Image: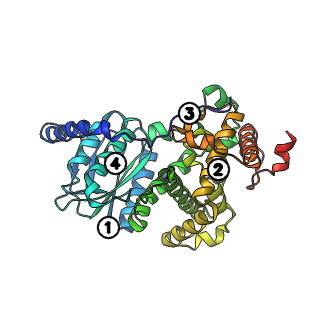
Amino acid sequence: MYAIQHPPINNICPALVNGLMHALKTLAMLALLFNSTVIFAGEQKMVTTASTNGELDTIIKGKINYYNSMYPDIRFVHLEGGKDWTGELIAIITMLGSQVSAMDYEHPPELREDVMEVSLARLRRMLKYDIVSATQFRLGQDSIFERPQLCVITLNPDAFVASDRAATQYMLDVSDEVLEKVHPSRYLNHKDHLEFTLDHEAYHCLDSHYHGGAPMTHETLGGEYHLFRRESIADAYAMAKHIKSRRKVTTYARNMVHYRALWLFTDSPNRCTFETIREVLKYPPDTLVTMSDMELGKLAIELRDGAVRPYDGYVRQRSAALKAAKVLGLDPALYGDQWCDCEKMETDPGLVASLVNRYRYYYDQLFTNNVIPLEAPPLTKVLQR
Ligand SMILES: [Zn+2]
């Protein structure tokens, strides 16, 4: 068994959320009257749960302040989740104003309320289960926030990046037993990882702001495809920011590329951004150092468009990945119901073999401190196994 899987996190059932949102809105009003645990003064977040790690808190505040100073149309806020997640959610919901709309999914005006409910249900899930996420809103006229848009980033540092070891285990989703065997040189630097992740999430909001949300589609896997494109560009941007600030390709950068290759089977395949993110490591760091955020964003688009296949190729790759998962003894249920059609498709045996090989190769390298070349191993080695 190579890894443990968990289900994709973006499937939301709108039917479940209507009653819930109504209840939450009512609760929110009561909370404002009787509970002062979460207080917002104007646009500034004053109190949430106490941070257990001042250093991580400083990194988070620094990043949030940076994006707030760079993008005056967007108010960036961080929600920590943890045990007071309901208080944070209530506070946000009551401050959005009326006629607020969610910006991460393109939709006609008549679907505004439906998309809002789905987006708030997703936000609730992210907070409840300490999942890192970003959600972008166009605020109502009567919102307490003075800027027209709001970017809500959820990230619980205690759950996500308490230490190098914790950050590594969270990313790899492996047991303590497997983690013991992972070579320490493969551990993610947790502070680097926190910064990278905040840049990644902030870019999701910038993506919705500048390019619109994920487009509407009638293709069976169209929603998944556009999510994959958004994940790829956010990773490329965050990695470019990381290399720019460190002025070189770091061990963290190499480890992240390594982990993204494994994510084809560890998390949602839509976060397996390996093909795009490794292109950033091939880009001259000296050039990245001279580039503005805008230029890094443009570069991220270029690299993503060069690396991510058109829709048909994406479906072929996922169909091959399903077969590869079976060869590896992994549970294809990881990919959810939408795999049914892919399963019936004819797949390219060479592509399946290369995905199997790539996974085995990167998995085995977790236990070594070899410097891994950025190119995946050649297919001929697969055929020899
Ligand atoms: Zn993302």
Residue that appears at 73% across and 55% down:
374
**Mark 3 vs 2, N-terminal side:** 2
Residue tagged 4: 119
Disc 1 residue lies near ligand 1 with CB under 8 A: no
Q: Mark 2 points at which residue?
A: 317
Task: Indicate which disc residue 107 carries.
Answer: none
Cα distance between the residues tagged 3 and 2: 17 Å
Residue 153, position in %: x, y?
A: 39, 50
Q: How crowded is mark 4: few (under 14 residues within 10 Å), some or many (20 or more)?
A: many
- Residue density around tag 2, few if under 14, some if 14–19, many if 20 or more, within 10 Å: some
Q: Which of marks 3 and 4 is nearer the N terminus?
A: 4
Q: Earlier in the sequence, mark 2 or mark 1?
A: 1
Give coordinates of residue 282: x percent, y percent: 69, 63
In x, y percent, where is residue 24?
22, 38
- Mark 2–mark 1 CB contact (< 8 Å): no
Question: Label 3 vs label 4: CA separation?
Answer: 25 Å
Numbered tag placed on residue 333 in the rendering: 3
